[in-house]
Image (cartoon, coloured by chain):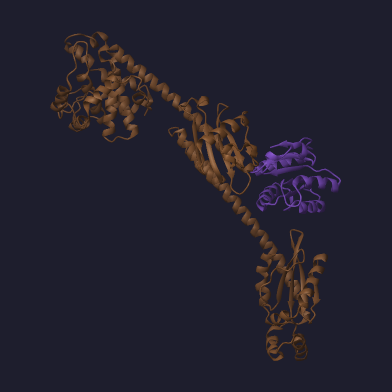
Amino acid sequence: MEVIRTALEPKAAELGLELSVWDAEGQMLPASQASNEFCRFVCASCRQCHSKRAELVQYVLNDGQPSRATGTLGCCLVGIPVFNRRRLIGAVILGYPTRQMGDQESLARLCHTLKLDAQAMAKIAEQSCRHDAVEAPHFLELFSRLLIEQQAANEADNALQSLSTNLASRYEELNLLYHISGSMKVSSQPQEFLQDVCDRILDVMDMEIAAAVVYDVRTHMGEDIIVHTGEDVDTQQLRLLAAIYIVPRLLVPGDLLLENAFDKKHDLYLKGRLDHLIAAPLTIDRKNIGMLFGINKRGQDFDSFDIKLLSSIAGQSSVFLANHRMYAELQDLLMGVLQSLTESIDAKDPYTCGHSRRVAAISKRMAEDMGFDAARTRQVYLAGLLHDVGKIGIPEAILCKDGRLTDDEYNNIKRHPEIGAKILRRIRNLEPIIAGVLSHHERLDGKGYPHGLSGGDIPLEGKIIGLADSWDAMTSHRTYRRGLSLELAVKELQDCAGSQFDPRLVEIFLSWDLEAFTKELHTANTNDPHLLDEQIP
Amino acid sequence: MNEKILIADDEPYILHVLAIKLRNAGYRIVTAMDGEEALATGLAEEPDLIITDYQMPRLSGLELCREYNRQAGRTIPAMLITAREFDIDLNIIATGGIAVVMAKPFSPRQVVQTVERLLNENATTTARI
C-alpha cells in the first residue's frame, strides 16, 4: 500500500484531491501533511472527517467495490478498493472540498462552526475548492484505472526484480563452475586447487566456513589434505567434524549431507557454533576419498540450490583429484624407469658408481644459480641424470678397459652422446632434455664432440652438464686412481675456463663452498628424496 | 483444446520462466503467488495439472493439492518444485496426488517433458526427479 501511496499522491495533489491510504484492516497509513490547503485547515479542526472516511473504507472493504460518500461538511469522498492478485489489500480514499463549500454563505457558516477566520478562509477556499460534487464519478473512474495500471507496473517491477536477482545468482554459480573447470590443470597441487575451490564457494554460497578434506589412506597421494576458509576456526576441530560426523553420513556414492538444524547435543564440534551443515563427497573410482563441506549459511537455511551446486563442484573437484593422482602415478612410473635406466648405466661402468646422480645434482644447482625457472631447472636435472645413458650402447670391454684406449676405442666411446639422444627420443616427455645430453661433451673452443660446436652454439644445458661431468670425474676416486684434490681440480677448472668451460659457469661454480658440497654429494643416499623426487619436465 | 496448467510459486521468476516455457509448448497457463490464490484460481479455472512450490504463504503446495482435489471433487496430476526437496516425505506428498517432486534449480526443459508425461499417462506413484 505504501508503494501505491507514493505513486498516487502526486497525481492526487495535482488535481487538488486529498488522498488517504488504508490497509485491509481498515487502518489508515500515517498520512503526510494534507496537500489541499483548505483541507489542512478544516480537517485539523474537524474530527468527523476521519471517521467519515473510515466508514467509507469499511464499506468499500466489505463490498470490494468502489463507492462514494459525502463528508459532514459537504466535501466529496471517493473510495476505491485495492487488489493485489485477486486479494483485497486495502483501499484509497480521495476527498475534496466542493465549490459549493466555498460559497460565501456556507463558508461563513463553516468558519463559524469551526472557529476559523472567515476572511482568511475565503481566500484559501477560492484556490482549493476547484471541483464540483458531480465530478466525483469521473475521479472514481480515473483513479480506478490509475490503480490498475499502478498495480500492473508494481507487479512487473517485482517480477523484474525477482528475475534479475535470480539471474545474478545463477550467473554467479555458472561463473564459479566455469572457473573451477578452467583451473583444473593437472600440474596444480591438490592443496592449492581445493583452497581456491573453498575460497570461491564461500563467497558464492555465502557461508561462514568452507572446507575440504582428502584422506591419504584413500588416495595415497602423500598426506591428508585439509583446507578451509572463512571465519577463524581450529583446523583440528574441522578434522574432527569431518572424521566423526560427516564421514559416516557419506558412505554410499551419491550420499549428500544437508542439515539446517544441527543437533546441539553435538556441540563438541566448533564449540556449538554449528547450525547449518552441508557436505558432498569427493570420490575417485566411485570411492569416497574425502569431502567438501560448508558451515552456516548467512541469514538463511541451506536449500536444494546449495546442495546441487556443492555436489556439482565436488564432482568437478573429484575429476581433478583423480587426474592428479593418475598424473602423479605416471610421474612416479617415469621417474622410476629413468632411475633404473641411470642405475643400469652406472652398473655397467662400476668405476662411476653414483656419477649420474651427482652430475644431476651439480647441474641442478648450477641451473638454479643461473636463474632458470623451475621447469628448465628440472630439465637440466634430468639431462644430468641421463647424460651418459648412451653408454648402454658401448661395449663393456671398452668402457671397463684398464689402460690406454686405442683411437678406435676412443671413437667408439665418443658415440655415447648421440646414442643417448637417440634412446631418449623415444620418450616424448623427455624431448626438451635431449639437447643437454647430446652436447655435454662439446667444448667452448670447438674441440669437443660429437659436432665440434663452439661458443654460443653449444646449448647452455650442455655446458652446465659438461662442467658437472668433468668436475665429478676429476674428484671421484676410482679403483685405479684416487680423485684429484679439490685444489687441483679447482685449478684445472680455472685453467680450462674459456677453452673447455664457459667462464661464467666456472665463476658461479667456484663461488660455492666446494668442500662441503662435494662431501655432501658423496655421502648422499641414492634415494635422497630431495635429489630424486623430481617431476618430469 | 490445449490443456491448462496452474502454476503456483511465491517467486515471480519461477512463474515467468515456467509460464514462458510451457506456453511455448502449447499449454494454457494460469498463475498464482500463494496457496490461497492458487486454490481460488484453480477452482475458477479448472486446470488439468498443477505445478506448485512447496513452501508458500497461506497454504503449502501439499495443502493446495489436497484442498483442490477435495473441493473440486476430482484428482488432477500435480508436480512439486521445491528448494527443500530433501525435507519432503514422498509418502505424505502422495496423499495430495503429487506424482513428481523436483528440486530447484530445475531444468525448464525437463519440466515440460514431465508435464507431457503426466498428462499422457495417469501416474500412480510418486517419484523424485
Q: Is residue B123 above or below residue A429?
A: below
Q: Which chain is purple?
A: B
Locate residue A117, reporting x and y percent: 70, 89
Numbered-mark total: 0
Q: Is residue A416 above or below residue A284?
A: above
Residue B122 locus on image (x, y percent) = 79, 38
- In the visual, does A414 lie left or right of B105? left
Residue A355 versus residue A133 in the image, above or below: above
Q: Give percent across and percent down for residue A99.
A: 74, 85
Q: On the picture, is A416 further left or further right than B121?
A: left
Q: Give me the chain that's brown.
A: A
Q: Residue at x 50, y 31 (%)?
A: A321
Q: Residue furthest left?
A: A495
Q: Does A80 appear above or below A413? A: below
Quarter of the image holding residue B113? top right
* The C terminus of chain B sits in image quarter: top right
Quarter of the rendering containing residue A477:
top left
Position of residue A417 in the picture relative to residue A111 (left or right): left
